[in-house]
Every structure is written in structure tokens, then in C-alpha cells.
């Protein structure tokens, strides 16, 4: 069997997570798929996968080889698309990861328009509030909200998420509305455990003075969806990206508090694997959502909670930067 075919089989084994899934795709057997990967290992003279009775994992050599294989396959796909000379012929599967609330509120509602523009493209959308390993998960592109940590990932900034301190009218009627960040210590504050400093909230007053407040409460969670439900139910105050509560704010289910203070915004980036030049399908996907977010009042850096213009959105013109990220 030719090397390219073996490479494609190896990539699918990594991305599906098991041999049997690839066997079903190929209408083959698990044993035959396993033998193809073994043939590739023999050809290369290195071990790519560590196998157990129920699962497998990539060796360090396997991770590096997988990244290179994906690059080759993407380039071949890009060449095919360019030859066909029409963006409607962009096809294949694009694997995308995003936080749960962000995917539900800001990716899924736009997919109808996206598929109308690219009808031959399929999307495998993985929603998870934890940071998914792009290599292990076989992810082509991931949305990241927040500052990116040092790593080898490639990122493009496509927006800004403004933060807000929010509570339900029922909670505020019962417990009173804080007028200064220091008063938060007397309130039930719902903490999102996905943050590095999970119970330290930051504010800046009109004079530029910084206020850091340690908060506590009966509830903390790693789920942004659970925290939203708790806030709407009147269980406490949250410190959160505005985009997660846009509809709730407009409907009056929650109310911004401490609006005289500025909360540090969060960058919205898309990240890619370091060894992979963005393919046409990735480039078109990112450009589509960057254009959408540029005019979204819950994401665009043009407006804050009160509608006052903030930092102007800097259009990157499709540029990519090696900035790192988790």
C-alpha cells in the first residue's frame, strides 16, 4: 500500500480515537486498519502509537508525525480546491472546538448562513469548557476566550469579550445592590473555576485606580451554563463575559451592576496546530466568523455594556501571528 494511504489511515485513527471507527469508515476490519498503522511504523522505523487492550495513545514521535501528516493532507486538499476554482467546492470535514456557551450562543446560530455559503463543507463541532488538546482531539481550529498562555500554537485575534458583573433583579431586591467592588465580600458570588485566579475579581474606577477583590459564595462551577442558570435563578453575582448573557440582559432577567467600573476585557482568538499552515477551509471558516463578530454587539470591541464606544476593532486582514495559547 502506498505511503499516502497509510498516512491517511494513521491520521484517521488518531482523530477518531480507535481502530474500529476507521474500520467502519473504510468498510474494513479493525485488524486490517491496525496492520496498516503497523506497516507505516515499520516503514518509518519508529513507534507511533502505544496500544493497550482498550485504547491507544501517541508517542512523542507519533505526535510530530501526525502534525506533519495533517499538513500534507491539508495541502493536497487545498490544491484540489484551487484547481476546481470555486469556493462552493470547498469540501471535507472541519473539526472545531469551542467553549460550551460560546458555541451554543454564537457559533450554532450562524451555521445556517455558513453552510449556505459552503454547502460541501461538513463541521464536527466539539463543545467543551476545558482546553482541548488540538493534536490528541484532531482539532483543526479552536476558539479560545482569554489570554493565551505560552505554547507552540498559532493564533489569530478575531474579537474581544467585554466582561460584566451581573445579578438577577430578584437577588438585588433581596440582598441589595453593591455600589463599590469592596462590597462584594458581603454577597454571594458565583465563581467560575476555569479561571486561573478563580475568586479574585478586578475592577478599574473612573480615575484609573485598580480594585482587586477576593470573593466567595456557596456555589462554584466549571460550567458556564450552570453558572448562567444559577445567576438567572437569583443565587448570586457573577463576573463574566458579556456575550454569555446578552439575551438575558436585554430581557431583564439579569442586570449589570458596578457599571461605573471598567472590567478587564478578554481577547477572543482562534488557534491552530503549529505545524499546519491554515488550509482554505480553515481560512474561510475563520474569516466568516471574524466578519460576523465584528458587528456583534455582545462580542465586538466597539461597544461596552452601556453602548459607549470602547477600543476600536483592529481588522487583521486575515493575518496570523505566532502568539501561543493553551
Image (cartoon, helix red, strand yellow):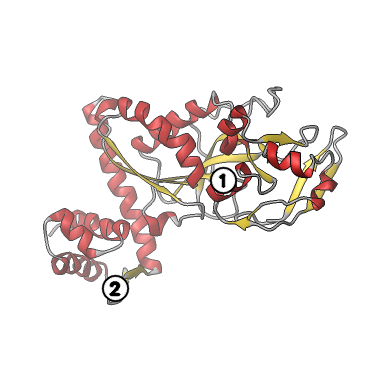
Q: Nearer the viewer, residue 37 or 103?
A: 103
Horizontal and vertical percent position of residue 209: 86, 40
- Number of residues whose C-alpha sits closer than 10 Å to that of mark 2, classed few (under 14), some (14–19) or many (20 or more): few
Look at the image and tell me whether residue 324 can be seen: no
Q: Are marks 1 and 2 in contact (CB under 8 Å)?
A: no
Residue at 51%, 27% (x, y): give it: 317
What secondary structure is marked by label 1? helix
Image point (51%, 52%), residue name? 129
Residue bearing mark 1: 229
Rendering coords of residue 284 (x, y %): 38, 31
Question: Mark 2 = which residue?
Answer: 54
Circle nearer the viewer, 1 or 2 = 1
Alpha-carbon span between mark 1 and mark 2: 37 Å
Label 2: which secondary element: loop
First in sequence, mark 1 or 2: give its number. 2
Residue at the (80%, 41%) spot, across then down: 176
Position of residue 254 measured from the top left corner of the image (x, y, whole percent): 65, 36
Neighbours of disc 1 within 10 Å: few (<14), some (14-19), many (20+): few
Front position in the image: 2 or 101: 101
Q: How many marks?
A: 2
Q: Quadrant of residue 220?
A: bottom right
Q: Is residue 257 visible?
A: yes
Asked whether, in this view, residue 140 is left or right of residue 244, the answer is: left
Residue 44, quarter of picture: bottom left
Q: Could you say which is closer to the camera, residue 221 or residue 112?
A: 221
Q: Is residue 187 above or below residue 112?
A: below
Quadrant occupied by the N terminus = bottom left
Q: Position of residue 153 (x, y in %)?
A: 50, 50
Amino acid at each position: 500500500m502506498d505511503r499516502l494511504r497509510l498516512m491517511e489511515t494513521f491520521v484517521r485513527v488518531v482523530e477518531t480515537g480507535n481502530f474500529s471507527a476507521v474500520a467502519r469508515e473504510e468498510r474494513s476490519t479493525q485488524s486490517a486498519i491496525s496492520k496498516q498503522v503497523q506497516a507505516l511504523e515499520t516503514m518509518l522505523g519508529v513507534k507511533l502509537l502505544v496500544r493497550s487492550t482498550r485504547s491507544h495513545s501517541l508517542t512523542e514521535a507519533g505526535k510530530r508525525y501526525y502534525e506533519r501528516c495533517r499538513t500534507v493532507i491539508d495541502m493536497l486538499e487545498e490544491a484540489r480546491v484551487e484547481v476546481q476554482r470555486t469556493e462552493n467546492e470547498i469540501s471535507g470535514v472541519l473539526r472545531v472546538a469551542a467553549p460550551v456557551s460560546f458555541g451554543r450562543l454564537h457559533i450554532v446560530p450562524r451555521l445556517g448562513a455558513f453552510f449556505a455559503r459552503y454547502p460541501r463543507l461538513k463541521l464536527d463541532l466539539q463543545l467543551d469548557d476545558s482546553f482541548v488538546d488540538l493534536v490528541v482531539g484532531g482539532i483543526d481550529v479552536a476558539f479560545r476566550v482569554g489570554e493565551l498562555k505560552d505554547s507552540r500554537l498559532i493564533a489569530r485575534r478575531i474579537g474581544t469579550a467585554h466582561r460584566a458583573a451581573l445579578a438577577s433583579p430578584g437577588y438585588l431586591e433581596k440582598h441589595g445592590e453593591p455600589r463599590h467592588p469592596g462590597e462584594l465580600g458581603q454577597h454571594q458570588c458565583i465563581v467560575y473555576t476555569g479561571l486561573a485566579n478563580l475568586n479574585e475579581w478586578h475592577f478599574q474606577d473612573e480615575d484609573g485606580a485598580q480594585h482587586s477583590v477576593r470573593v466567595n459564595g456557596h456555589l462554584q462551577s466549571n460550567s458556564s451554563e450552570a453558572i448562567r442558570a444559577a445567576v438567572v435563578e437569583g443565587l448570586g453575582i457573577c463576573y463574566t463575559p458579556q456575550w454569555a448573557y446578552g439575551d438575558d440582559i436585554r430581557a431583564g432577567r439579569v442586570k449589570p451592576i458596578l457599571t461605573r467600573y471598567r472590567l478587564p476585557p478578554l481577547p477572543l482568538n482562534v488557534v491552530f496546530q503549529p505545524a499546519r499552515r491554515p488550509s482554505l477551509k480553515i481560512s474561510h471558516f475563520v474569516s466568516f466568523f471574524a466578519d460576523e463578530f465584528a458587528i456583534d454587539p455582545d462580542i465586538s470591541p466597539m461597544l461596552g455594556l452601556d453602548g459607549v464606544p470602547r477600543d476600536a476593532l483592529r481588522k487583521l486582514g486575515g493575518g496570523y501571528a505566532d502568539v501561543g495559547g493553551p
